[in-house]
Image (cartoon, rainbow, N blue to C red):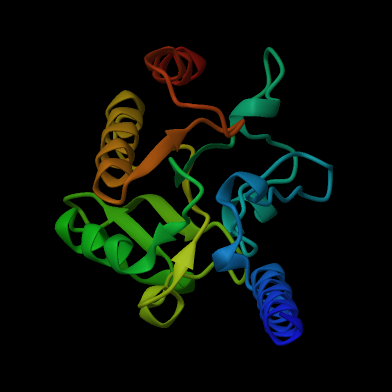
Amino acid sequence: MDLISLLITIFGIMILLGLYVMSRLFSQDPSKQNNKDITIPVHTDRSGNRLSSIKADIPARDQPTTTSMSMAEPGQPIQQFVLFIASKTATPLNGNLVLNAFQELHLTYGDNQLYHYLTENKDKLFSIANGIAPWTLSEENLRDKNTPGLSIIMPLPTPIESNNGINIMVDTSSLLADKINGELQNDRQQIFLETDRQSMLVSIA
């Protein structure tokens, strides 16, 4: 009986050590963390106005006196619209699915290592960035990797009629979210509703 007790004790210690090692690995690798515990970063400009999670957001940086939709006060110009896509579950978004979805939706990889929606005239309507540093979406950042989310940013004014631009952004983002098992969110990282689309349309009327 003493031998059996000793073996049971050793086995229990091995299990505890294994759980400890696994917990350390998860705490060091953001891609293995619970997605609900990760908040997609939001940056501010020199005036403290909220911007997107794109670290090198040139339109935002060059126009510090304007503001994004969520921070706009009555009478102030709106600088850009921001949406997010996050996982519906505790599992982060699969980078391989994201890359495939970008191709299916004819999104173009380009400036700042981001993906862009181009109009018929090849003008950028909106851009998509990674939800985590370094914000880029190269194949190296996504292939066989995970991400907690994506950021979709449309600067204003748009190269096409604004109402059409908003609808294209929302519809494309919704399709992208479906294809990657994600959840479309508004600029406050809450579930995107049709009322959010209407608010966007009204804000530029």
- Residue 2 visible, this angle: yes
Q: Residue at x 62, y 30 (%)?
A: 188
* Of residues 22 and 157, the one drawn nearer to the viewer in this rendering: 22
* Of residues 27 and 134, the one drawn nearer to the viewer in this rendering: 27
Q: Residue at x 43, y 73 (%)?
A: 145
Residue most toward the front?
1
Is residue 68 positioned above or below 130 on the image?
A: above
Quadrant position of residue 65? top right
* Quadrant including the N terminus: bottom right
- Residue 158 visible, this angle: no
Q: Residue at x 58, y 52 (%)?
A: 59
Residue 56 in the image, given as x and y percentages of width and height: 62, 64
Residue 128 in the image, given as x and y percentages of width and height: 42, 55
Quadrant position of residue 106? bottom left
Residue most toward the right?
47
Residue most toward the bottom?
3
Image position of 10 (left or right of 22): right
Quadrant position of residue 74? top right
* Quadrant including the C terminus: top left
Q: Residue at x 47, y 56 (%)?
A: 92
How many callouts does the rendering have? 0
* Of residues 143 and 25, the one drawn nearer to the viewer in this rendering: 25
